[in-house]
Image (tube, rainbow, N blue to C red):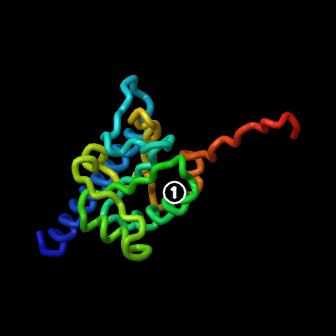
Amino acid sequence: MNVGTALALCSMGVSAFAVLAVGAVYARLRGLERAEGGGDAARLAPAGLSPAGGQDVSLVVLLDGGCALCPGLWRQARAFASDRPDVRLIGLVAAEEAARRLAGTDGPGEGAPLADPAAWAEMYEGYTPCLYLVRANGVIAHRAFVYADTDVPALLTRVLPAPAVPANQGGRA
């Protein structure tokens, strides 16, 4: 066997491994998406991620410091939740460095994500970025993985519909 043939065989082996690895990640993500809401046991979020006083839900955006999608997702989530006092927005990262990097995307001191390695590890399911909707009782009511082709505004609107407008109390329309 000559050197060219050996290199070609090695390249084929590496390519086959890469295809299998990508397929395994894809299958894992699709399995997690199908499993959402499928079980009887409710999944609880760490206590620090529950809504604060007067808020109905927490929107937890699980982020990673090295993720290419995370800065844009964090900006869009902040813009979406900025006029929603009923929503507690939490950007969750594993390290202070990632929190500083993501906070610096719009200027210093603005919208810094929470760096909590324990909570991040508890929420992490093998993929970032991910959105979680946490109810007041701490139950994770919704989870959505965010991909490069995800329409983030549509996803946020679906996950967090506009608050109900109170009915007209005056009797006349």
The spot of residue 119 in percent (x, y) is 27, 47
Image quarter (top left, top right, bottom left or bottom right) of the C terminus: top right
Q: Residue at x 23, y 53 (%)?
A: 117
Q: Is residue 168 left or right of residue 97?
A: right
Residue that badge 1 annotates? 150
Q: Is residue 54 above or below residue 95?
A: above
Residue for point 26% across, 53% down: 116
Q: Position of residue 143 (x, y in %)?
A: 44, 43
Point out the residue furthest to the front here.
170
In the foreground, 20 or 148: 148
Write down the quadrant of residue 45 in the picture: top left
Above or below 107: residue 24: above
Horizontal and vertical percent position of residue 138: 38, 36
Instruction: Give the farthest residue toward the top.
Output: 40
In the image, taking residue 146 as reference, residue 82 lies left or right, namely right
Quadrant containing the N terminus is: bottom left
Label 1, residues with CA under 10 Å away: few <14, some 14-19, many ≥20: few
The residue sitting at 88% across, 37% down in the picture is 172
Look at the image and tell me whether residue 104 can be seen: yes
Res 143 visible:
no
